Amino acid sequence: MKKLSKLILTEMKYRNTPILVAALEKEGRICQLNPMSLNSDSILGNIYVGKVKNIQKNIQAAFIEIADGIMCYYSMAEKASPYFVNVKKNNVLKIGDEIIVQVSREGIKSKLPYVTSNLNFTGRYLVLTSERKELGFSGKLKKEEKKEIREILKDKIPENVGVIVRTNCRDAQEGEILHELEELMKRYEEVLKKGKSRVCFSLLEKSMPEYVQILQNLYGQDLEEIITDKKELYESAVQYLKVYKQQEEIVRYYEDKLLPLYKLYNLEKAFEQAQNERVWLKSGGFLVIQQTEAFVCIDVNTGKFIAKKDIQETFRKINLEAAKEIAWQLRLRNLSGIILIDFINMERDEDKEELMLTLQKYLWQDSIKGTVVDMTELNIVEVTRKKVRKSLAEELKELL
């Protein structure tokens, strides 16, 4: 039987700082932690009228100001067609141009936020894109499901946009899918309409609160319960599920004043453990996880594990256990970019292949795309995980 997950939404004090937390529990463990300021004002996903302040042709980039003092990186290599607010004779981007952009990645460490002309409008079932003018599908959908949804959307998608079908779409009725497509098109057209009449630095569309985005990104059939002890969060969750005709009964309002929700689920301990370099495995082995400026490195060690027979079989078992835990820790800590994993050396090719397939299987369970790239001659496994938000450690550093 498939184990379902719970979403916990609550307020707590962490190291004497009040924060809002969205935590996902699966298999009796916290697998995702999203700390937020109580008056959080993230710009990720926001759409602005931005102004081109500088162009660096040698790196195919422009620097665009979206608000007073907020500079962003804009890749010209994407070849996205800018939507100009100012009158232009051609589509060549120049300093002083005003264009509509969306924040696609938060500023991380010394790097600026990323903005793009490829506007994305995300629903529960579909993502509408302004540039990628084709029909795409979540890799988690089966061939038969893709074929069925393709028939539903056939001749329904306008030529000036593209659509990406999300995993949640497999549980939606035809009417729900087409209604969402219509609503996403209305949002897109409203943004373009506003852009024509608004001044520079105008916010054309604000992204949903982060906790609602988390709910939106979860696969509905895997979610058993949403628990919160905050009335406004309870009402927001119920309202969201009503819009998408989902079961409102899964939202529970927690009212026990003697045992706060964050203590019931040991969220303080979860935050502390998610920042430890060393992670012990049940076998007695352990991981060492270190985040550097350039990449994340993970070392797998035998630790206290004592082999009684075949040493290669011992290494295989520890590595397979480590692969599952590494995928878990990447999601928990929100580690992204280049990840290098030094597994215990194995001699048999079939063991190495099994390890790579196992690691990819667990990475697929994450809502953020992770890919096993290769194993080097030195037996270092290369993994990439898409960068969207700051890591958990960086989020906490900003909040505390």
Image (tube, rainbow, N blue to C red):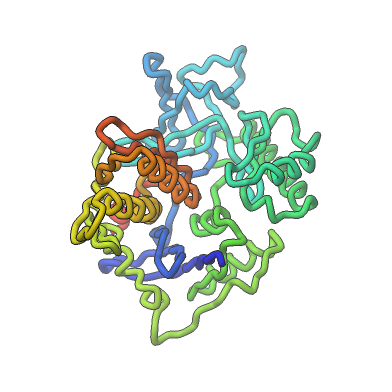
- The foreground one among 1 and 371 is 1
Q: Is residue 33 above or below residue 193?
A: below
- The foreground one among 30 and 209 is 30
Q: Position of residue 131 (x, y in %)?
A: 61, 29
Q: Position of residue 11 (x, y in %)?
A: 41, 69
- The foreground one among 379 and 133 is 379
Q: Position of residue 256 (x, y in %)?
A: 45, 85
Question: Where, quadrant-wise, is the N terminus in this rendering?
Answer: bottom right
- Residue 161 makes an appearance in the image: yes
Q: Identify the residue at image location x=36%, y=44%.
A: 351
Q: Identify the residue at image location x=80%, y=34%.
A: 155
Q: Identify the residue at image location x=33%, y=66%.
A: 270
Figure quadrant of residue 119: top right
- Residue 394 makes an appearance in the image: no
Q: Is residue 5 above or below residue 312?
A: below
In the displayed structure, does residue 264 sit left or right of residue 188?
left
